[in-house]
Image (cartoon, rainbow, N blue to C red):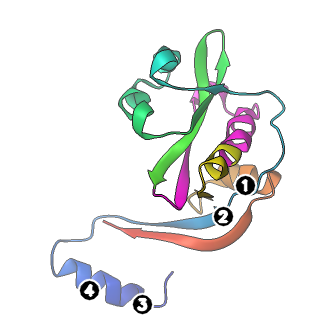
Amino acid sequence: MPALHDCYLDLLSRHKPVEKIWSGPAYVAVEPGPPAVEPARITNGNAELLHAHFQDWLPDVPHRQPFFAKVLDGKAVSLCCSVRVSNTVHCAGVETHPDFRGNGYALDVVARWPREVRAHGATPFYSTAWANAASQRVAAHLGFRLVAVDFHMT
C-alpha cells in the first residue's frame, strides 16, 4: 500500500466515492528470446481469429498494437497486446481463454510482445494483480524485472 494511501483516498472521496482499489507488481519486460512457437500478429486483416473467444477485444485491434495471439485450429486462445500506450511506454494486456489456461500459451504471446514494443522505440511494462499468481509466474519465467507497484483507485 502506498505511504499516502489514506491521503489519496480522502482527496478522491471528496469528488466521488472510491469504489475500487487495485494494486499489483509492475515489471519492466526484458527481451526473453524468441518464443517457443511464434504467435500470430493480429491486425484488422485477421481479427476474425478473435471471434470465437475474444469478441470483446475486436474493437481494440487497431488501437492495441502490437497485438499477438496464440492460435489453435484457427482460433485465438491467448493474447498479448499494448493496452496503455504512449510514445515512450507500452503496458501489456494479457488474456488466455479459461479453457486453455495452464498450457503455457501466455508465455509465447508475452515473450514476443516486448521485442516489438522496443522496435517502436518504447519501453515495455507488464503488470498484474497481487492475487494473480499465474501472471506473476509468466513474468518470472520470462525474466521480467520488478520495478514498481501499480496502484489504482476508481
User: Crowding near pointer 3: few (<14 within 10 Å), some, many (20+)?
Assistant: few
Residue 13, above or below 41: below
Mark closest to the chain's N terminus, 3 or 2: 3
Mark closest to the chain's N terminus, 1 or 3: 3
SS type, badge 4: helix
| Residue wearing tag 2 | 27
Number of numbered discs: 4
Work out whether residue 70 or residue 5 is closer to the camera in this orientation and state it. 70
Give the alpha-carbon distance from disc 1 to disc 4, as whole Å: 33 Å
Residue lying furthest left: 15
Work out whether residue 103 or residue 56 is closer to the camera in this orientation and state it. 56
Q: Are marks 2 and 4 in contact (CB under 8 Å)?
A: no
In which quadrant of the rendered view does residue 71 lie?
A: top right
SS type, badge 2: strand
Kind of residue at disc 4:
Asp
User: Crowding near pointer 1: few (<14 within 10 Å), some, many (20+)?
Assistant: many
Give the residues drawn in magenta, as a range.
86-114
Kind of residue at disc 2:
Tyr
Q: Residue at x 65, y 43 (%)?
A: 116
Kind of residue at disc 3:
Leu
Residue 154, above or below 109: below
In which quadrant of the rendered view does residue 80 lie?
A: top right
Q: Residue at x 59, y 63 (%)?
A: 130
The numbered dot on residue 10 is 4
Work out whether residue 83 or residue 21 is closer to the camera in this orientation and state it. 83
Residue 61, above or below 2: above
Apparent side of residue 126 relative to residue 60 in the rendered image (left or right) = right
The numbered dot on residue 139 is 1
